[in-house]
Amino acid sequence: MRRHGVLAVVVALVLVVPPLLVVSLRQNVELKPFRGTDLAESHSMIAELLRGERLVPPPAPPPEVFTNAEMRRFHPEVISADRRWDKVDGALRQRVLAIYRVMKQQYGVEMVLVEGFRDAERQKKLMGKGASLAGAWRSCHQYGLAVDSAPLRDGMLQWDMEDAWTRQAYFLYGELAKEAGLTWGGDWTNLKDYVHVESRDRCLAARRARQARLDARNGS
């Protein structure tokens, strides 16, 4: 009986301890390489989400995520950025939220809105600092047709593309953005903007419409 009791305890430990370790260390689990089959499933999830329920933005992270010492030192422009989802075009908002949900549910990557709408004054300042190549009313942000997002890990926004986890997260973000019909800034040649996605065709149409209004006003 004693031998059976000891054996039962050993078996119980073998069955219970590994799952407990996985749960306790889950926040430190690295992303696995993204296989073609994974992305095929992700693409299907994106399509289903866009056909289905109306998605709502996730709760905003704590304010210190955007105001900590690292942000103040290396990304001060983010602190004053507009992160109001209701200022983002509705169709774009649904596509981005679908991407967020797939990344969270399938890969465990939490994405955070860093900036949405941008007014002309802010655009001018960012261009002057070299943070943007677009002049006033040339950026899709100014029409609510672009957003910047970053992955969140251990309470910190991740920017370092030399870090394998961060790089993989951004490339997944870009892959899913393209599947959702968006343009990803990571594909640009002049300035790689990994955080950026936009509704390119609608943005171009909005810029043309604005210019037409200006031309009509000046010609009247």
Image: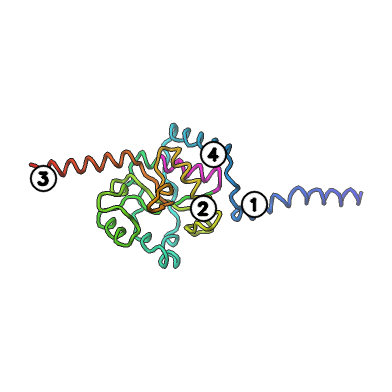
How far across and down, in percent of the image, does residue 155 sit?
50, 59
Question: Who is closer to the viewer here, 116 or 133?
Answer: 133
Residue 218 - label: 3
In-image side of 83 versus 4 (left or right):
left
Q: Secondary structure at mark 2?
A: helix
Earlier in the chain: of badge 2 and badge 4, it is 4
Decide: marks 3, 1 in contact (CB < 8 A)?
no
Is residue 51 highlighted in magenta?
A: no
Decide: marks 3, 4 in contact (CB < 8 A)?
no
* Separation of marks 2 and 4 at Cα, in angstroms: 16 Å
Q: Secondary structure at mark 3?
A: helix
Residue at label 4?
A: 39
Which residue ends up furthest to the front in the rendered image? 189
In-image side of 29 versus 1 (left or right):
left
Q: Secondary structure at mark 4?
A: helix
Which stretch appears magenta?
95-108
Label 4 amino acid? Leu
Residue 76 - label: none
Residue at label 1?
A: 23
Label 1 amino acid? Val
* Separation of marks 4 and 1 at Cα, in angstroms: 25 Å
